[in-house]
Amino acid sequence: MNYFPQLPRPATFIARYVAALFLLLMLWGAISGYYLNALIALVNVATSLAGMPSQLQLPRFAGHDVVFTGVVGGIALFAVTPDRPMVWKLRWFALLVGLLSAAHLLVLFLQMHLVYLEILDHQDHDLPSQSLSAIRAAYRYSAGYLIEFWRRWGSAVLSLLLWLGALSLHGGPVGESAPD
């Protein structure tokens, strides 16, 4: 049993993907600021819960830049997938947006936490122990690497892996059956 749909010729599939991406990017341009402000509000709650000072609260986004375009790329990939019902696509859209939003929240929080550690290091009049310094350095390196990876490849890799996983399953996240 092959649960992967018969994809059209690569050129046709890519053309459909680019067209869907173009249309979705126009829509995303109008709503991405709202998405970012929702993420900022959640990050600000998380930084408060983590005991970080209120000066580290992120301001509301007031620009017109299009942010987090990986969300659009992933949705476009599911949108142009042939031989799948709309309900299947909508369920996978929701899962994709949920996973990407969680990842965006984590990355924004990590960035704020790294800033907080820098502030603490400059405020500490007593030098931390050598082992604590090593732990902080390892954390900074790991978090910085994760943030940089996410900026370059994260949303694209996650979207592609989720799409491939969705195609290989019998159905969507709630267990629809795949077409024969």
Image (cartoon, helix red, strand yellow):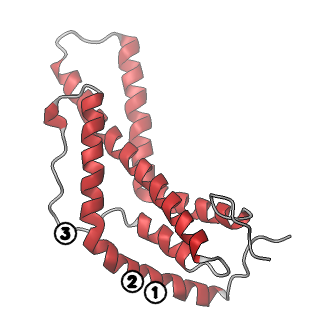
| Front in this rendered view, residue 63 or 84 | 84
Quick one: quadrant of the N terminus? bottom right
Q: Residue at x 38, y 67 (%)?
A: 69
Callout 1–callout 2 Cβ contact below 8 Å? yes
Callout 3–callout 2 Cβ contact below 8 Å? no
Which label sits on residue 34?
A: none
Q: Residue at x 26, y 38 (%)?
A: 45
Which label sits on residue 23?
A: 2
State the image coordinates of residue 87 (x, y, percent, origin top left). Answer: 58, 71
Determine whether, in the image, residue 15 is placed left or right of residue 55.
right
Q: Residue at x 51, y 66 (%)?
A: 93
Q: Quadrant of residue 23?
A: bottom left
| Amino acid type of the residue that numbered disc 1 sits on in the rendered structure | Ala
Give the spatial CA distance, label 3 vs label 2. 17 Å
**Disc 1 target residue:** 19
25 is higher (above) or lower (below) than 161: below
Judge the density around disc 3: few (<14), some (14-19), many (≥20) Cα neighbours within 10 Å: few
65 is higher (above) or lower (below) than 128: below
Determine whether, in the image, residue 37 is placed left or right of residue 2.
left
Which one is earlier in the sequence, the residue at label 3 or at label 1? 1
Task: Report helix, strand or loop for mark 3.
Answer: loop
Judge the density around disc 2: few (<14), some (14-19), many (≥20) Cα neighbours within 10 Å: few
**Disc 3 target residue:** 64
| Front in this rendered view, residue 28 or 176 | 176
